[in-house]
Image (spheres, rainbow, N blue to C red):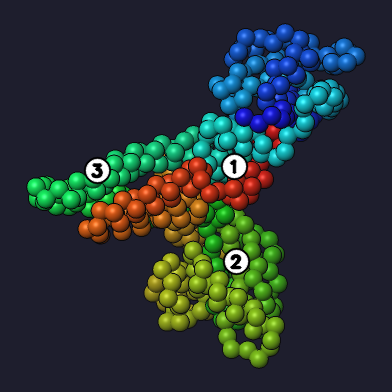
Amino acid sequence: MTEDTIFALSSGRPPAAISVIRVTGPQAHEAGNAVAGELPEARSAAVRELRHPATRELLDEALVLRFDAPASSTGEDVVELHCHGGRAVVDAVIAALSGLDGLRPAEPGEFTRRAFENARIDLTEAEGLADLIEAETESQRKAALATAEGGLRKQVERWQEALLALSARAERAIDYVDDDDDDHHDAEAKLALNRDCGALASELQEWLARPRAEPLKDGVRVVVAGPPNAGKSSLLNAIAGQERAIVTDVPGTTRDHIEVPLALAGIPVLLTDTAGLRETGDAVEAIGVSRAAALVEAADVLLWLGEPEETPAHPRAIKVHAKADVRAPAPRGSVAVSALTGEGLKTLLEEVATVARSLLPSEDAIALNRRQARHIGEAAAALAASAGTQDLVIAADELRQARSAFDRLTGRAGVKDVLDALFSRFCLGK
């Protein structure tokens, strides 16, 4: 428990119908008494007059809720003041709280950080909550909510229980390793331990093979590429529905990439126009070409507007026969599109949406972010190493490494820099 008691407006910026001001910390109930008088019973609500602690001036009439530690959102004593949402009312109540000794305004994310530090949530739930606040599409909301409600935490707890059982078996086997009368049983125990460590490692690898959270959160990167004057910028403008890229007949007009965030059939997409791929003596254009090549490699989906036989080796390349209104029929396997007439745009976007959807987690699945996948990968590698050794001491040490990886995953150890970055994403009062 921290010694500080903090407060903040937790609802939206006024004016609003109702504004919620939260207070948490060891002096929360005392502060509530000073402003609202006698507090209701724990986990109950009551209407109270809010008065300035020094002057007793009436500030508002509000709904007051009280929560007692540790059964609160932060694990501390909490008071919530649900007052009218006018700016003057909120400012007056905040000013009254500011005048109380031992209270200070909360920093961004401090309420959620206290919930984490008081073991009300783990790091994966905090990450899910941050993503939920930032969610802009329905698919983002559902994925974030699954994590924020503890879906990954519960799964990790099951893995940790299994891992602890494996560690106990390894340590027990070490104790009897010098028992010459039980060599056969010792060999069977090693074999069973190796087998079960390998099975758990395989389960973790299956989770790592699932679609990740980043494309869902940041958008599926759809890169438009090809030689100069292939119609890349025109296609981007047609898809975006506005003039985002300069279009001319002069080769090399696009010298840097242009990004346009879109929602395509409910899927977040980052559409990227690139410089034409060619050999050039222009130093500036050469930089653009180099960046374009890098973007092609990093693309989740590639729209290739060049000759079909020149399509880069990419697992999700869609061949586009651009300028279809003035060119011969499209080769087999290419989508004919005209940015001028709109021909083929619907077909192309449907194909892009189908490919992009395959990169996203299903709505009922838990999606791992990059940090979570890294630590699960560390645990899987340690388990695989334990499964591959006949030395019980080494096996036990690898299992300890796997437990440490799970501790980093849930935030029990070695994550201070992660916490600082995470909770800075939260708004005041959250």
Residue 354 in view, yes or no = no
**Type of the residue with mark 2:** Thr
* Residue position marked by numbered label 1 in the rendering: 130
The Cα atoms of the two marked residues, 3 and 2, are separated by 57 Å
Q: Are marks 3 and 2 in contact (CB under 8 Å)?
A: no
Q: Which tag, 3 or 2, sits closer to the chain's start?
A: 3
Q: Residues within 10 Å of mark 2 (few under 14, many from 20)?
A: many
Residue at the spot x=51%, y=45% of the render? Answer: 413
Picture quadrant where residue 154 is located: top left
Q: Observer-nearest residue: 235 or 304?
A: 304
Element type at marker 2?
A: strand
Vertical arrangement, residue 314 with respect to residue 426, above or below: below
The residue at the point 64 percent across, 71 percent down is 257
User: What amino acid is found at the position of numbered circle 1 in the picture?
Assistant: Ala
Q: Quadrant of residue 79?
A: top right
Q: Position of residue 361 (x, y in %)?
A: 43, 49
Q: Which residue is mark 3?
A: 172
Give the spatial CA distance, label 3 vs label 1: 42 Å
- The percent coordinates of residue 67 (x first, y second) are 61, 18
Reading the image, the residue beneath label 2 is 272
Tag 1 or tag 2, which sits nearer the N-term?
1
> Foreground mark, 2 or 1?
1
395 versus 11 height, above or below: below
Expressed as whole percent of the image width and height from the top left, the position of residue 384 reads 30, 57
Query: Which corner quadrant of the image does residue 3 belong to?
Result: top right
Along the horizontal axis of the image, is 261 left or right of 176?
right
